[in-house]
Amino acid sequence: MNKSKSKGLSLRQKEAATGIAFIALPLISLILFMYYPIIRSFMISAFDWNLLSDPKFIGLDNYKTLMHDEVFKTSLLNTCKWVIIYVPMSVITSFLLALLLDQKLKGAGFFRTLYYLPVVAPIVVVALLFVWIYNTDYGILNFILKKLFNMEPIGWLTDSRYSLFAIAVMSVWKWAGYNMLIVLAALQGIDDGIYEAAAIDGVTPMSKLFKIKIPLVMPSIYFVMLTAVIDAFQMFTEIFIMTKGGPGYSTYTVSYYLWSCAFEYSKMGYACAMAAVWSSESPVNQYTCPPASTRRKHFWVGSRQNRAFPSPTT
């Protein structure tokens, strides 16, 4: 009896050791590559350090300077503008492409592959391609506008009125195929019985779109919107390649300004203070799914006993 009991305890200890071994590596990686850099960044933010000389402790001076930094305020405003421009464009474009490919069209697989190709291409290649397309003197976009509408050349990347929008168009073109596949998978996962019941009830195509398709794919749209917002707040590579923050500070975002302070001007302490403020105040720190009751009231329910669409007030 004692032998079996001790043997059982030994087995449980082995299982516990196995479990600890499985979580040890991810836990150590999380501490080393996430929590330690965050703590270290907060520590460096209290110093004046140019990466070459010894750090000089200055307390909260970096944070005080940051509060009066007009370039930081401009980059913060540009980041918000970027989110407002990019996120709706990305979500709407992806949804429209998914709707188009959800139809029974010949060559749908070819177009699906064609729309996805920009996702495979490196962002550096895509950005350089659009730099050529947007070129004021010999860019193909100005050439087409000149031939079709006799328009004067537009400085898409050299005019502060157009630069942020032009970069947003490039980013949407780059990632639309990826987001399209997510929404398309949700559309093709809708039960055909729902469409058949809707046809029996005489539902119009527009009602089918707004009362069946959009509500049922809303979780996928939420996901696409979330990833678009996260990407927008972290946007750096496109600006680094296409405009370097110009013209002026019109395309400076927080991410680009942070990198510029750290590695162009060697103000590592100031950059760490900026990172601390930005990470604590950024709207994208967690994602909360809508309550189940909120999701359910948007779903159209079809059954033999009760086939009805939810009224606008429910």
Image (cartoon, rainbow, N blue to C red):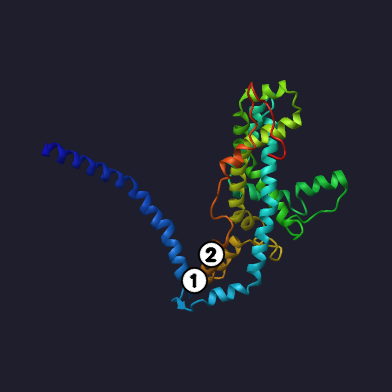
Instruction: Name the amino acid type tagged 2.
Output: Ala
Report the residue marked by disc 2: 275
Q: Is residue 178 left or right of residue 203?
A: left
Question: Residue at 63% of width from left, 73% of height from top?
Answer: 69
Q: Nearer the viewer, residue 167 or 73?
A: 73
Q: In this view, does 191 lie to the left or right of 203?
A: left
Q: Relative to residue 219, is residue 304 depicted above or below?
A: above
Q: Give the crowd class for mark 1: few <14, some 14-19, many >=20 residues within 10 Å.
A: many
Quadrant occupied by the N terminus: top left
**Quadrant assignment, res 95:** top right
Q: Nearer the viewer, residue 178 or 115?
A: 178
Single out the residue that lies furthest toward the left. 2
Q: Is residue 180 visible?
A: no
For the residues bearing labels 1 and 2, Cβ distance under 8 angstroms:
yes
Question: What is the secondary structure assignment of the residue under circle 2?
Answer: helix
Q: Can residue 74 be seen in this view?
A: yes
Question: Along the polypeptide, which appears first: circle 1 or circle 2?
Answer: 1
Which mark, residue 30?
A: none
Instruction: Name the amino acid type tagged 1.
Output: Ser
Q: Relative to residue 309, is residue 294 depicted above or below?
A: below
Report the residue marked by disc 1: 45
Single out the residue that lies furthest toward the front. 305
Question: What is the secondary structure assignment of the residue under circle 1?
Answer: loop
Quadrant occupied by the C terminus: top right
Count of residue discs: 2
Single out the residue that lies furthest toward the right. 150
**Residue 277: % across, % down:** 55, 66
**Residue 38: % across, % down:** 46, 62
**Quadrant assignment, res 79:** bottom right
Q: Which of 231 and 134 is in front in this view?
A: 231
Question: Residue at 66% of width from left, 54% of height from top?
Answer: 83
**Residue 232: % across, % down:** 62, 53
